[in-house]
Amino acid sequence: MRIAVYAPLKYPDHPTPSGDRRVARLLVDALRKANHEVEIASHLRSFDRKGDAARQARIARIGARMADRLLRRYRAHGNAPALWLTYHLYYKAPDHLGPRVAAALSIPYIAVEASIANKRANGPWDIGHRACIDALRQAAAIVTLNTRDDAALNAYLRDDCRRVALAPFLDPTVYRAPRKAAPIARLLAVGMLRHGDKQRSYEILASALAKLGDRSWNLAIAGDGEARSDIETLFAPFGDRVTFLGMRDETTLAQDYANADIFVWPAINEAFCMALLEAQAAGLPAIAGNFGGVGSILADGKTGFLSAAGDADDFAAKLATLLDDADRRKTMGNTAQTKVRREHGLDGASATLDTLVRGLAA
């Protein structure tokens, strides 16, 4: 089946790594694994970080023109998709293409990881907010990767809209590099070095580590971004105990997980955190902030610990527990790896999406 896939926040082949790009690629992989023909419908990014109404209006106009161009191409070549699937629909990155194309072709429109924020109505992102509502009202199916926004979404969905819960997923075979023992507990954080929530996560991590200076540990940080100098300053007091690895590709990052003992991430305002899933696939126990859908990935007390959201003291206390108990780290890591392979694998996600799209097409 031919499926048009669109990711208005960050398209799957965007040059800059991020969790959004990672999930977009995984969705494409899952559909192709089920033998569907996937077309990346557009590289238009509708993302507006600052709430610029003029920019949003301009992007909406461009989106409408691109949708019409797609329709002309589909009709001229007779290669229209059977379905349209949009990943990560929200007010800062609305979909101005999919609803228009799907309606014109009379094909199902699917939104994966959609969210709604009614407080954005009549504000700086009102155009994006209204576009999201229009898309939700047209959706034949909604696929949720966490349940945080379910109640808000239901107010805008048709009665016949299918609701499908899909656990965050990856290909666990990528994360099977052999592990090596080390005399010092090796901590790993993976996250872009950006201002805002990412920087706030690093601030909490630095504050927590300052309370654990008497214990034996070092920290590697994988990621890069415009806030790097500010974040390096945060960790400067720790000297050579903290290493910045820079941007890592998937292969190198898999080895970084294998070289670590504990994954650490305060996860400020994270939806679910792909790096947390990757770390557990590699057999790492984790300490993570209890935000969004993080608790659906990390089994508290079994595959690691959830710390109170935004609480550096609690994060430090939970981390101290694992720093002091190597046997528990190993047990939790093994449990984490088993859980990911059983509940968050690519095969299961592919089967779930295949059942959905074939049912809609029928």
Image (tube, rainbow, N blue to C red):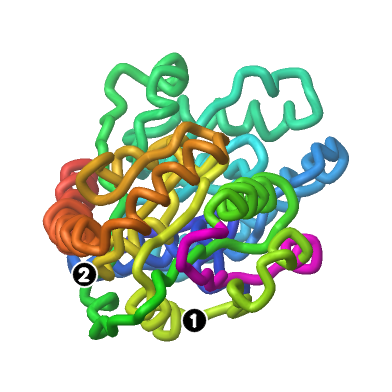
**Residue 30 visible in image:** no
Name the residue beneath numbered marker 1: 249
The residue closer to the viewer here, 181 or 61, is 181
Q: From the image, which quarter does the C terminus lie in?
A: top left
Asked if residue 215 is among those painted magenta in the image, a careful observer would answer yes
Q: How many marks?
A: 2
Residue type at mark 1 is Asp
Name the residue beneath numbered marker 2: 33
For the residues carrying marks 2 and 1, which lies nearer the camera in this image? 1
Where disc 1 sits, the SS reads loop
Q: Position of residue 48 (x, y in %)?
A: 74, 46
Q: Position of residue 224 (x, y in %)?
A: 66, 71
Where disc 2 sits, the SS reads helix
Q: Quadrant of residue 176?
A: bottom left
Which residue sits at x=37%, y=58%?
A: 323
Which residue sits at x=23%, y=85%?
A: 178
Q: Position of residue 53 (x, y in %)?
A: 84, 36
Which residue sits at x=40%, y=61%?
A: 263
Which residue sits at x=68%, y=34%?
A: 128
Q: Mark 2 vs mark 1: which is more N-terminal? A: 2
Which segment did they paint magenta?
213-232
Q: From the image, which quarter does the N terminus lie in?
A: bottom left
Q: Position of residue 63 (x, y in %)?
A: 67, 50
- Please state if 13 lies on the left or on the right of 338 as rendered: right
Residue type at mark 2 is Lys
The residue closer to the viewer here, 119 or 222, is 222
- Please state if 30 lies on the left or on the right of 51 as rendered: left
